[in-house]
Amino acid sequence: MKVDLTLDACGLYCPEPVMMLHNKVRDIVAGTVLEVIATDPSTERDIPKFCNFLGHELLESRAEDGKYFYYIRKSDD
């Protein structure tokens, strides 16, 4: 998968990862693929809900070695 940008939210806890994601998504163009890396388990619930609510495409999510990885394609503005 081609990733355009990465947002590192490691070490941050709810609601900071989603707030950072929201700010980052506002600054990128539609179609951009953003990788989000987090360590807070609540992102497993919060990031899919964020994408669903705002219409962004969650391409993939996975957990590995205590980190959570999300790949999000920004929807059309």
Image (cartoon, rainbow, N blue to C red):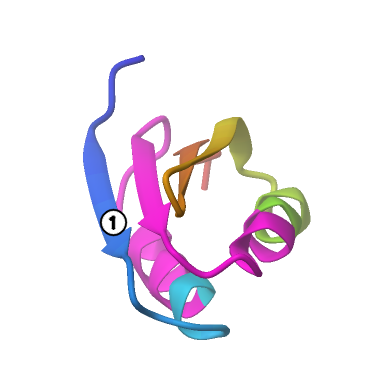
Residue 26 falls left or right of residue 50:
left
Q: Could you tell me residue 14's position as x and y percent?
A: 57, 83
Q: Could you tell me residue 56's position as x and y percent?
A: 61, 43
Q: Is residue 30 visible?
A: yes
Total numbered labels:
1
**Nearer-the-camera pick, 23 or 36:** 36
**Nearer-the-camera pick, 24 or 7:** 7
Q: Is residue 17 above or below residue 25?
A: below
| Residue 42 is a magenta residue | yes
Instruction: Name the amino acid type tagged 1.
Output: Leu
Image point (45%, 54%), residue name: 66
Which residues, given as a range, are shown in magenta?
19-47
Q: Is residue 17 above or below residue 62?
A: below
Outermost residue on the left side: it is 5
Tell me where residue 63 sits by quadrant.
top right
Q: Is residue 17 above or below residue 77?
A: below
Image point (41%, 38%), residue name: 30
Q: Could you tell me residue 40's position as x and y percent?
A: 52, 70
What secondary structure is found at the residue carrying circle 1?
A: strand
Image point (42%, 45%), residue name: 65
Residue neighbourhood size for the residue with mark 1, other residues' Cα within 10 Å, grouped as few (<14), some (14–19), many (≥20): some
Residue 12 falls left or right of residue 58:
left
Outermost residue on the top side: it is 1
Image point (36%, 42%), residue name: 35
Tell me where residue 8 sits by quadrant.
bottom left
Which quadrant, please, contains the N terminus? top left
Residue 53 falls left or right of residue 67:
right
**Which residue corresponds to mark 1?**
7
